[in-house]
Image (tube, rainbow, N blue to C red):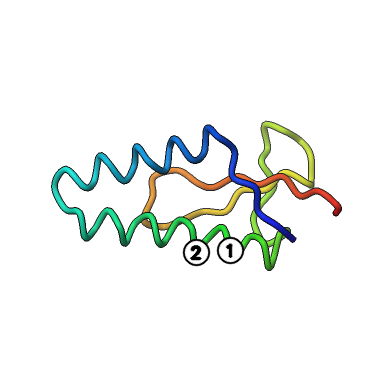
Amino acid sequence: MKVHWTKNAIEHLIKIHEYIAANSPAYAKRMVDKITKRSTQIADFPYSGREVPEYKAEHIRKAHQSTLPDYLQNKVRSN
């Protein structure tokens, strides 16, 4: 499966990097690396996350990243 990053998700990733980099460029890079690595895991195991209750659709999942206050959401689509 291929992970498609929306424009909004990319903008958020950039803002996360910029915010953290203001104090620690090295930590900002590590955080972005963790997030992008997690998206690779989603590609390999698209149903590994939990369903998102507010959507009530089994093909929309959330993957918790312990170092972030929120989570990554993905929508599973057939190729």
Horizontal arrangement in the rendering, residue 58 relative to residue 64 (left or right) = right
x, y (%) of residue 52?
A: 66, 41
| Mark 1 lies on residue | 40
Quarter of the picture holding the N terminus: bottom right
* Residue type pointed to by label 2: Lys
Question: In 3D space, how far apart are the residues under numbered discs 2 and 1 (Cα atoms)?
Answer: 5 Å
Labelled pair 2, 1 in contact (Cβ < 8 Å): yes
What secondary structure is found at the residue carrying circle 1? helix
x, y (%) of residue 68?
A: 38, 50
| Mark 2 lies on residue | 37
Residue drawn at point x = 71 percent, y = 59 percent = 46
Residue drawn at point x = 76 percent, y = 36 percent = 56
- Which labelled disc corresponds to residue 17? none
Q: Quadrant of residue 79?
A: bottom right
Instruction: Report the front residue among 52 and 7.
Output: 7
**Count of marks, rendered view:** 2
x, y (%) of residue 8?
A: 52, 32
What secondary structure is found at the residue carrying circle 2? helix
Q: Residue furthest left?
A: 23
* Residue type pointed to by label 1: Thr
Residue drawn at point x = 70 percent, y = 57 percent = 2
Residue drawn at point x = 56 percent, y = 58 percent = 39
Q: Residue furthest right?
A: 78
Instruction: Report the front residue among 61 and 23.
Output: 23
Horizontal arrangement in the rendering, residue 58 relative to residue 43 (left or right) = right
Q: Compared with residue 6, is residue 49 higher up or lower down, i.e. above or below?
A: below
Q: Quadrant of residue 35?
A: bottom left
x, y (%) of residue 61?
A: 68, 48
Instruction: Report the front residue among 62 and 28.
Output: 28
Q: Within 10 angstroms of label 1, few (less than 14), some, or many (20 or more) residues?
A: some
Q: Within 10 angstroms of label 2, few (less than 14), some, or many (20 or more) residues?
A: few
